Amino acid sequence: MGTSKANRKAQRYAFATRAIRAGHSRTNEGEQAEPIFTTSSFVFRDAAQAAARFAYEEAGNVYSRFTNPTVRTFEQRLASLEGGESCVATASGMAAILSMCLGLLRAGDHVLTSRSIFGSTRLLFVNIMSRFGIEFDFVPLDDLDAWRDGIRNNTRLMFLETPANPLTEVGDIAALAELAHHRDILLAVDNCFCTPALQLPLSLGADLVIHSATKYLDGQGRCVGGAVVGNKELVGEAVFGVLRSGGPSMSPFNAWVFLKGLETLDLRMRAISDNATQLARWLSEQSAVTRVFYPGLATHPQYALAKAQQHAPGGIVSFEVGGGREAAWRLIDATELLSITANLGDLKSTITHPATTTHSRWKPEQREAVGITESLIRISVGLEDISDIQDDLHLDRLT
Ligand SMILES: *Cc1c(COP(=O)(O)O)cnc(C)c1O
């Protein structure tokens, strides 16, 4: 688990500096780069020390399911970037959401969640967590009245993604935090699309930040991982307890890859946002494109909110073409450079058809309710030259 005095001291450095330096305490070997501790367990000086470590009377490593120095470096660095007290790294983004639920909810609790959420998150809530006596209700992300009206006496958690996948709707984190705290409800924000480089949910009042490190934190499509960030009580104790006893832990190697990803996060997110803004503007001018979804366009319904809440609009651009699934698939299949894959957050641009991939396990009426049509295409804009990305989208062949 990532909390330390050194880290709190490091908070005086700027974001880009912390992204490179936070969390690493150099060992006696004097290494410059962060070492990977590929060891499952740690050796104690004597039996008394073993007992003290197990009892938490003495800080230190025990076993890599819950204490590994490389994983801890990643946790401390991410906690520092999000401005959180504690961070727990997990095996995947879904494991982060699962660990948060297991750590903070109990049977009889009610969760109010935005209906525009990652496909697997909805399925985790509806198909799995609901079997343990937790109830879920879904509300439109941007409808504050619906959130207010949806609160019940047993509501324990409000959960959202912003910008949401794939239509980039934006939720008002500060307003939702106020609503939640008025009723003693926790607010969790999946910060996958923005990362702390572009948005700091904790500073806007959220209690918990969720990450799929698989996406922009890695940034090069190499490893699967996740994290929960928040205060010591919620994350450092409750969620950490799930990790210690339940074991959805991050491997040290993956933690090291994510550490390297964090070092360039700030640069990448700004460059990706610039590329995505150019692509969104260009798409808006194409006659074959009927609609573009991107928080950086003045036509986005929450353009002003996105501008106030985020440092930049991010890298996800979705758009609709006339002609339904047939036209959308034709456009996707005609690409030669873009990768046809549902992953996002990679330096390599990716293209996907949400209705038949990321959101295919939803019922058609659920997709319709949030506006995921058969004509919709999502691009996770990477760092190739923007003219090559544009040339790869043969929109002329659709008209
Ligand atoms: C990918 C993703 C997740 C799940 O993360 P995994 O690492 O794939 O388990 C959760 N939320 C959002 C917004 C995502 O894009």
Image (tube, rainbow, N blue to C red):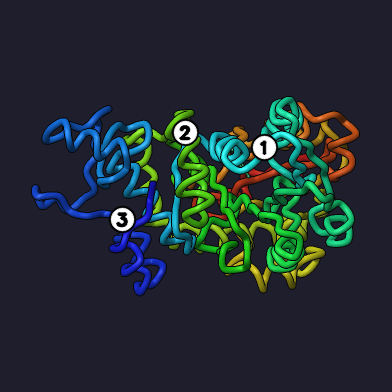
In this orientation, does residue 210 appear?
yes
Residue located 89% across and 56% down the image:
149
Please, what is the three-letter code of the amino acid marked with disc 3? Gly
> Within 10 angstroms of label 3, few (less than 14), some, or many (20 or more) residues?
many
- In percent of width and height, residue 25 lies at 22, 55
Depth check: give the residue in front, 262 or 101: 101
**Pair 3/1: label in front:** 1
Specify the label residue 117 is tagged with: none
Residue topped by disc 3: 23
Mark 3 or mark 2, earlier in chain: 3
Residue beneath disc 1: 106
Dot 2, how many residues are within 10 Å of its Cα: few (below 14), some (14-19), or many (20+)? many
Which residue is rendered at x = 83% and y = 53% of the image?
151
Question: 390 left or right of 354?
Answer: left
Residue at the (41%, 68%) spot, across then down: 15
* Earlier sequence position, callout 2 versus callout 1: 2
Checking the image for residue 91, the label placed there is 2
Within the image, what quadrant is residue 298 found in?
bottom right
The tag earlier along the polypeptide, 3 or 1, is 3
Q: Secondary structure at mark 3?
A: loop
Mark 2 residue type = Ala
Horizontal side of 31 relative to 6 (left or right) equals: left
Q: Is residue 148 above or below residue 257?
A: below
Quadrant in the picture for residue 267: bottom left
Q: CA distance from mark 2 to mark 1?
A: 22 Å
Look at 37% across and 31% down and name the residue there. Answer: 65
